[in-house]
Amino acid sequence: MHMEFKMEKRTIGRQKEEVRQEDFELAYKFSKILFREMGDMLKALVLFGSTARTGRKEKDIDLLVIVDDVTVRISPELVETYRIITEKAVVEVSERLHITSMKFSSFWEYARAGDPVAVNILREGIPLIDAGFFRPLQALLFDGRIRPSPESVWTYFARSPRALFSARRHVLGAVLDLYWAVVDSAHASLMMLNVTPPSPDHVAELLDKMLVARGLLKPHHVETMKKFYDLQKRVVHRELKELKGAEYDELYKEAAAFVDDMKRFVESREFASDGKKHPSARKAP
């Protein structure tokens, strides 16, 4: 007995119609080249990122290449060959292509644990090549059957304190950048008088002796130099452990004003080979 029934095709995830045709064609051309060179070693090639999400014209076309490390041993020689193949393919197709590579076992582990990166790729990705696992994983995700594991929750949470600490260190690192901006501009000013650049701990002293005493700079320039020298010592010796954003903003303004004054001084004179005051020198900024 022959029974007739209607099968309705299920649509999972985003479709190629949601992507700009030019972007899709470039990605597809790249996928054909890569498949021709790599064959079954290529488990999936996925278009993702802002291109897949919105279809808007972006500078980069993001592609994820998932390679088989389950049935193939990934040797250094194979990695180098893969790198050469992908780089040549990008040059041949378009410099707009941005390639991210991942091992099959790693992607599977991330997806199984509900890792945010893998989940986002599954949610937004459009597979151009699929060995039969990417669309099923997408179906599991959209059915609510891929959920974060307790391990992945704590793995991601553990990154937060480190990120906060890193942010704090970046602010202190920016203070050191301000210090070097002050030191370098002060060195340049002294060099205009044919003075050999001194070590940073003697810059303030020489500014006072060679520039302030001659009326070429103001006393507050020496104070700024001393301030930033002391500040960098506190940062380097970890005596200063934290700096508020407003405090950094004030330091930036002071350093920028110092650098501007040094620039005006340097531009106001010609290089003095004898270290004496040049007739064209102007008074302190």
Image (cartoon, helix red, strand yellow):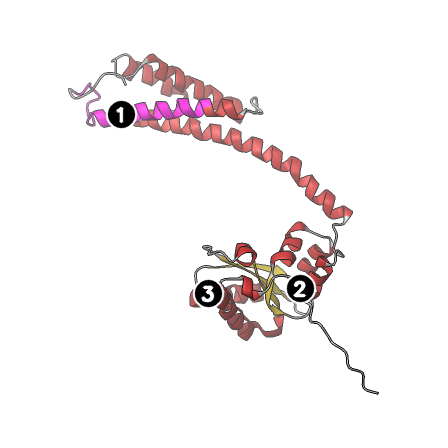
The quadrant where residue 3 appears: bottom right
Residue picked out by circle 2: 12
In the displayed structure, 138 sits above or below 278; it is below
| Sooner in the amino-acid sequence: mark 3 or mark 2 | 2
The label on residue 264 is 1
Residue at (52, 29) in percent of width and height? 172
The quadrant where residue 122 appears: bottom right
Q: What amino acid is found at the position of numbered circle 3 in the picture?
A: Glu
Separation of residues labelled 3 and 2 (CA atoms): 23 Å
Q: Is residue 256 magenta?
A: yes
Q: Residues within 10 Å of mark 3 (few under 14, many from 20)?
A: few
Quarter of the picture containing the C terminus is top left
Q: Is residue 81 left or right of residue 135?
A: left
Task: Using the image as rendered, state which of residue 126 and residue 71 is in the foreground.
Answer: 126
In the displayed structure, 129 sits above or below 224; it is below
SS at badge 2:
loop
| Sooner in the amino-acid sequence: mark 2 or mark 1 | 2
Give the percent coordinates (x, y) of residue 138: 68, 61
| Sooner in the amino-acid sequence: mark 3 or mark 1 | 3
Give the percent coordinates (x, y) of residue 218: 31, 14
Q: Is residue 220 left or right of residue 31?
A: left
> Which residue is the extreme one toward the bottom?
1
- Start-end of magenta stretch: 250-278
Residue at (64, 37) in percent of width and height? 162
Give the percent coordinates (x, y) of residue 207: 32, 18
Give the percent coordinates (x, y) of residue 111: 70, 56
Separation of residues labelled 3 and 1 (CA atoms): 51 Å
Q: Is residue 128 magenta?
A: no
Residue picked out by circle 3: 22
Q: Residues within 10 Å of mark 2 (few under 14, many from 20)?
A: some
Task: Using the image as rendered, state which of residue 10 and residue 264 is in the foreground.
Answer: 10
